[in-house]
Image (tube, rainbow, N blue to C red):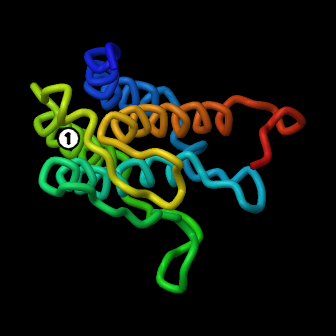
Amino acid sequence: MRDIPDLLDGLKRTPSILSQFVATIPEQKLDLRRGDGFWTIAEHVNHLAEVQPMLLQRIDRFLKEEHPQFIPYLPGQGEEEPDTPSRLEITTALDQFTTCRVKQLELLKGLDETTWCRTGTHPEYEAYSLYILTRHILMHDHWHMYRMEELWLTRDAYLTKL
Protein backbone atom coordinates (compact mmCIF):
# COMPACT_ATOMS: atom_id res chain seq x y z
CA MET A 1 0.00 0.00 0.00
CA ARG A 2 3.00 2.27 -0.36
CA ASP A 3 1.48 3.42 -3.65
CA ILE A 4 -1.49 5.20 -2.01
CA PRO A 5 0.02 8.68 -2.61
CA ASP A 6 0.56 7.72 -6.26
CA LEU A 7 -3.01 6.42 -6.60
CA LEU A 8 -4.42 9.60 -5.07
CA ASP A 9 -2.22 11.73 -7.31
CA GLY A 10 -3.43 9.76 -10.34
CA LEU A 11 -7.06 10.23 -9.31
CA LYS A 12 -6.43 13.95 -8.84
CA ARG A 13 -4.82 14.28 -12.28
CA THR A 14 -7.37 12.22 -14.23
CA PRO A 15 -10.02 14.96 -14.70
CA SER A 16 -7.43 17.20 -16.36
CA ILE A 17 -6.05 14.36 -18.48
CA LEU A 18 -9.57 13.36 -19.55
CA SER A 19 -10.69 16.92 -20.34
CA GLN A 20 -7.57 17.74 -22.34
CA PHE A 21 -7.75 14.42 -24.17
CA VAL A 22 -11.43 14.83 -25.11
CA ALA A 23 -10.73 18.37 -26.33
CA THR A 24 -8.33 16.94 -28.94
CA ILE A 25 -10.96 14.63 -30.45
CA PRO A 26 -12.82 16.10 -33.44
CA GLU A 27 -16.45 16.71 -32.53
CA GLN A 28 -17.74 14.57 -35.42
CA LYS A 29 -15.92 11.57 -33.91
CA LEU A 30 -17.60 11.82 -30.48
CA ASP A 31 -20.84 10.11 -31.52
CA LEU A 32 -19.42 7.78 -34.16
CA ARG A 33 -20.41 4.17 -33.47
CA ARG A 34 -17.69 1.86 -34.79
CA GLY A 35 -19.87 -1.27 -34.84
CA ASP A 36 -22.54 -3.30 -33.08
CA GLY A 37 -21.86 -3.53 -29.38
CA PHE A 38 -19.37 -0.66 -29.44
CA TRP A 39 -19.94 2.42 -27.32
CA THR A 40 -19.18 5.80 -28.84
CA ILE A 41 -16.48 8.04 -27.38
CA ALA A 42 -19.20 10.30 -25.95
CA GLU A 43 -20.84 7.30 -24.29
CA HIS A 44 -17.53 6.40 -22.62
CA VAL A 45 -17.22 9.98 -21.32
CA ASN A 46 -20.80 9.86 -20.06
CA HIS A 47 -20.24 6.49 -18.41
CA LEU A 48 -17.24 7.86 -16.54
CA ALA A 49 -19.38 10.76 -15.32
CA GLU A 50 -22.37 8.55 -14.44
CA VAL A 51 -20.45 6.04 -12.30
CA GLN A 52 -18.63 8.58 -10.13
CA PRO A 53 -21.53 9.14 -7.67
CA MET A 54 -21.82 5.37 -7.17
CA LEU A 55 -18.08 5.13 -6.55
CA LEU A 56 -18.27 8.06 -4.12
CA GLN A 57 -21.02 6.22 -2.27
CA ARG A 58 -18.86 3.09 -2.09
CA ILE A 59 -15.98 5.07 -0.59
CA ASP A 60 -18.38 6.59 1.93
CA ARG A 61 -19.74 3.17 2.87
CA PHE A 62 -16.23 1.86 3.52
CA LEU A 63 -15.70 4.79 5.88
CA LYS A 64 -19.02 4.38 7.72
CA GLU A 65 -19.78 0.65 7.71
CA GLU A 66 -17.92 -2.21 9.38
CA HIS A 67 -17.90 -4.61 6.38
CA PRO A 68 -20.13 -3.27 3.59
CA GLN A 69 -21.70 -5.60 1.06
CA PHE A 70 -21.88 -4.29 -2.48
CA ILE A 71 -23.86 -5.29 -5.53
CA PRO A 72 -22.30 -5.23 -9.00
CA TYR A 73 -22.91 -2.28 -11.28
CA LEU A 74 -23.44 -3.77 -14.73
CA PRO A 75 -24.29 -1.19 -17.41
CA GLY A 76 -26.74 -2.46 -20.00
CA GLN A 77 -28.04 -5.32 -17.87
CA GLY A 78 -31.45 -5.44 -16.27
CA GLU A 79 -34.81 -4.20 -17.48
CA GLU A 80 -34.29 -0.62 -16.31
CA GLU A 81 -30.74 -0.32 -17.59
CA PRO A 82 -30.14 1.04 -21.12
CA ASP A 83 -27.61 -0.71 -23.39
CA THR A 84 -25.52 2.45 -23.62
CA PRO A 85 -24.92 5.38 -21.27
CA SER A 86 -27.09 8.47 -21.56
CA ARG A 87 -25.79 11.30 -23.73
CA LEU A 88 -25.00 14.40 -21.72
CA GLU A 89 -23.36 17.41 -23.33
CA ILE A 90 -19.61 16.68 -23.14
CA THR A 91 -18.70 19.67 -20.95
CA THR A 92 -21.53 18.75 -18.56
CA ALA A 93 -20.24 15.18 -18.31
CA LEU A 94 -16.66 16.35 -17.76
CA ASP A 95 -17.78 18.84 -15.09
CA GLN A 96 -19.80 16.12 -13.34
CA PHE A 97 -16.79 13.79 -13.44
CA THR A 98 -14.50 16.47 -11.98
CA THR A 99 -16.92 17.57 -9.24
CA CYS A 100 -17.43 14.03 -8.05
CA ARG A 101 -13.72 13.24 -8.20
CA VAL A 102 -12.97 16.20 -5.92
CA LYS A 103 -15.50 14.82 -3.40
CA GLN A 104 -13.94 11.35 -3.62
CA LEU A 105 -10.49 12.76 -2.94
CA GLU A 106 -11.77 14.77 0.02
CA LEU A 107 -13.00 11.52 1.60
CA LEU A 108 -9.76 9.67 0.87
CA LYS A 109 -7.38 12.40 2.01
CA GLY A 110 -5.43 11.71 5.19
CA LEU A 111 -6.79 8.24 5.98
CA ASP A 112 -4.72 5.96 8.20
CA GLU A 113 -3.52 2.49 7.20
CA THR A 114 -6.24 0.74 9.21
CA THR A 115 -8.93 2.59 7.24
CA TRP A 116 -7.27 1.77 3.91
CA CYS A 117 -7.36 -1.91 4.90
CA ARG A 118 -11.11 -1.98 5.58
CA THR A 119 -12.73 -4.80 3.67
CA GLY A 120 -16.11 -5.38 2.15
CA THR A 121 -17.81 -8.05 0.11
CA HIS A 122 -18.39 -7.74 -3.62
CA PRO A 123 -19.63 -10.78 -5.60
CA GLU A 124 -17.44 -9.96 -8.61
CA TYR A 125 -14.17 -9.96 -6.67
CA GLU A 126 -12.30 -12.45 -4.50
CA ALA A 127 -11.08 -9.57 -2.34
CA TYR A 128 -12.44 -6.05 -1.94
CA SER A 129 -11.20 -3.23 0.24
CA LEU A 130 -11.06 0.55 0.24
CA TYR A 131 -7.53 0.28 -1.14
CA ILE A 132 -8.63 -2.07 -3.95
CA LEU A 133 -11.62 0.15 -4.77
CA THR A 134 -9.38 3.21 -5.00
CA ARG A 135 -6.96 1.45 -7.33
CA HIS A 136 -9.91 0.08 -9.32
CA ILE A 137 -11.33 3.60 -9.84
CA LEU A 138 -8.05 4.81 -11.33
CA MET A 139 -7.69 1.76 -13.58
CA HIS A 140 -11.33 2.05 -14.68
CA ASP A 141 -10.81 5.70 -15.65
CA HIS A 142 -7.73 4.92 -17.69
CA TRP A 143 -9.20 1.82 -19.33
CA HIS A 144 -12.07 3.94 -20.67
CA MET A 145 -9.67 6.66 -21.82
CA TYR A 146 -7.60 4.06 -23.64
CA ARG A 147 -10.76 2.69 -25.25
CA MET A 148 -11.77 6.20 -26.37
CA GLU A 149 -8.37 6.69 -27.97
CA GLU A 150 -8.64 3.32 -29.65
CA LEU A 151 -12.13 4.16 -30.99
CA TRP A 152 -10.84 7.46 -32.29
CA LEU A 153 -7.52 6.44 -33.87
CA THR A 154 -7.38 2.69 -34.51
CA ARG A 155 -8.06 1.40 -37.99
CA ASP A 156 -10.95 -1.08 -38.24
CA ALA A 157 -8.73 -4.13 -38.81
CA TYR A 158 -6.94 -3.49 -35.51
CA LEU A 159 -9.83 -2.35 -33.33
CA THR A 160 -10.28 -4.52 -30.23
CA LYS A 161 -13.61 -6.31 -30.20
CA LEU A 162 -14.83 -6.76 -26.65
User: Percent x, y for residue 97?
Assistant: 29, 44
User: Percent x, y for residue 79?
Assistant: 53, 86
The residue located at (48%, 26%) in the rendering is 24
On the picture, is 67 further left or further right than 155?
Answer: left
109 or 131, nearer to the observer: 131
Q: Quadrant of residue 6?
A: top left
The residue located at (45%, 33%) in the rendering is 22
Q: Which residue is mark 1?
A: 104
Amino acid at the residue labelled 1: Gln
Q: How many marks?
A: 1
Q: Quadrant of residue 129?
A: top left
132 or 79, nearer to the observer: 132
Q: Residue extending furthest bottom?
A: 79
108 or 42, nearer to the observer: 108
Q: Residue extending furthest right?
A: 157
Above or below 55: residue 87: below
